[in-house]
Amino acid sequence: MTPEPRDLLRGARATLAEVVLPALSDPFAIEQAKTVVRVLVHLDAVIDDAYALEWEEARDLAALLDEPASTLANAPASYRALRDANVERKRRVAERIRAASAAGAAPDAALADYVRRQSQRDRRWTSPKPGIDPAGGVA
């Protein structure tokens, strides 16, 4: 049985908070270790949603780019592959925006809808779930 990513994050966070931090005396090292603990807390809060959020973004980008439905028929198995595909889609969206801007055209409603939905996903990604103590423990 292998540990899940959440178990690895919690183990690393506990080691930093319970073993490494108490052993540090340098104020800069302490602050850096606390920053890493906060990052681990954040990742623990959002890790379960990462693929789902990226998949929602893929669907929205594909629709915005008028990609055929078959493009997303088989979701990439890995988060990295899905993310890489979305980065390429975002590049194409940026090209579309630049072309429309150069032509003096206003952004279309589909783009505005995409931005609204993406902003909601970004807020979810950047706002950890309630009940997580930024110092490293569960509140």
Image: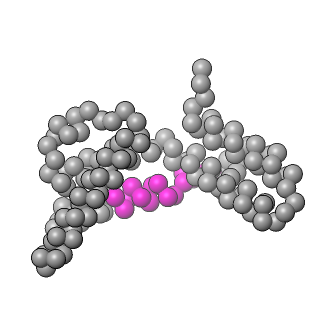
Count the labels in the image: 0
In the image shown, does 88 or 122 lie closer to the viewer?
88
Q: Residue 67: x and y, percent?
A: 16, 47
Residue 57 visible in the snapshot: no
* In-front residue for pair 94/60: 94
* Residue sitting at x 26%, y 32%: 74
Q: Given the current orientation, which residue lies at the most extreme top position?
A: 1
Magenta part of the chain = 118-132
Establish if 12 lies above or below 99.
above
Which quadrant of the figure has residue 116? bottom left
**Helix, strand or loop: magenta stretch:** helix
Residue 44, image x, y percentages? 58, 45
> Measuring 16% from the left and 70% from the top, which residue is drawn there?
99
Residue 121 percent location from the top left of the image: 39, 55
Q: Quadrant of residue 50?
A: top left
Examine the structure image and report whether residue 128 is included in the region drawn in magenta. yes
Against 120, residue 55 (above or below) is above
Colour scheme = one colour
Q: On the image, which quarter does residue 101 sit in? A: bottom left
Q: Residue at x 56, y 48 (%)?
A: 43
Which corner quadrant holds the N terminus?
A: top right
Give the residue drawn at x 72%, y 60%: 32
Q: Would residue 103 be visible to someone looking at this image? A: yes
The x and y percentages for residue 98 are 21, 71
Q: Is residue 47 above or below residue 120?
A: above
Q: In screen coordinates, is 128 left or right of 13?
A: left
